[in-house]
Amino acid sequence: MRDEYLTICSSVIFELIAPDAPVVPVEVELAYSSRDPYAVQASFRTGGESSVNWVFARDLLADGLVAPAGAGDVKVQPVPHDLGRIELELTSPSGHAVFTTCAARLAEFLDRTFEVVPAGSEYSWLDFDAALSNLLANDRARD
């Protein structure tokens, strides 16, 4: 466990791709915290004050920069006809969406996260005492 935690944020434009419709730019705030070293949070700004939040495995995004990665709800891969772009496919009970974004911007963000928490060292950043306390507090709140 570490006593000092770091957060990295980056605003990136993703393009919502829909059949027979113009591309829609969507501002996405990517956030990484060494408190949750395996995950990247993406907040998709849907207009006004609202946003839709997804949490991805950091390794899934990194793997998807070079080859198709993911199964089920989240898939990431290079765009076949434009290797400078990444495709992100999201599926949930409420819908399905396909986005593309600049591979270099995503890679820059991920590189910064790996500088803070190198691959393979994530486990040493976990605070098991805090996680257990949160779980127990949530159980007591439900009682």
Image (spheres, rainbow, N blue to C red):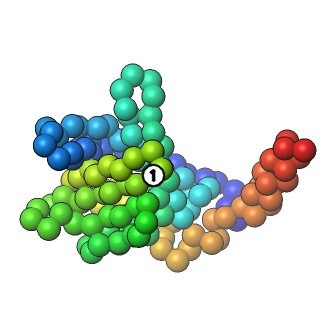
Three-letter amino acid code at disc 1? Ser
Q: Position of residue 2 (x, y in %)?
A: 67, 61
The count of marks equals: 1
Q: Nearer the viewer, residue 57 or 124?
A: 57
Q: Nearer the viewer, residue 71 or 117?
A: 71
Splitting the image into 4 quarters, where does residue 129 fall?
Answer: bottom right
Q: Nearer the viewer, residue 69 or 130?
A: 69
Circle 1 — which element? strand
User: Which quadrant of the rendered structure holds the N terminus?
Assistant: bottom right
Q: At 36% across and 26% down in the image, what residue appears?
A: 47
User: Viewed as shown, does residue 72 lie left or right of 123?
Assistant: left
Q: Where is residue 122 in the image (x, y as percent from the top left)?
A: 57, 70
Q: Where is residue 60 in the image (x, y as percent from the top left)?
A: 41, 68
Q: At 15% across and 61% down in the image, what residue appears?
A: 84
Q: Nearer the viewer, residue 128 or 76?
A: 76
Q: In this view, does 20 lie above or below 100?
A: above
Residue 9 appearing in the image? no
Extreme residue toward the top, this view: 48
Splitting the image into 4 quarters, where does residue 13 fall?
Answer: top left
Splitting the image into 4 quarters, where does residue 127 fall?
Answer: bottom right
Extreme residue toward the left, this view: 81
User: Viewed as shown, does residue 112 lie left or right of 138?
Assistant: left
Residue on which the image places disc 1: 92
Q: At 17% across and 47% down in the image, what residue appears?
A: 19
Q: At 39% across and 22% down in the image, what residue appears?
A: 48
User: Which quadrant of the rendered structure holds the C terminus?
Assistant: top right
Q: Where is residue 25 in the image (x, y as percent from the top left)?
A: 23, 37
Q: Within 10 Å of the Cα at label 1, are there few (<14), some (14-19), or many (20+) other Cα atoms?
A: few
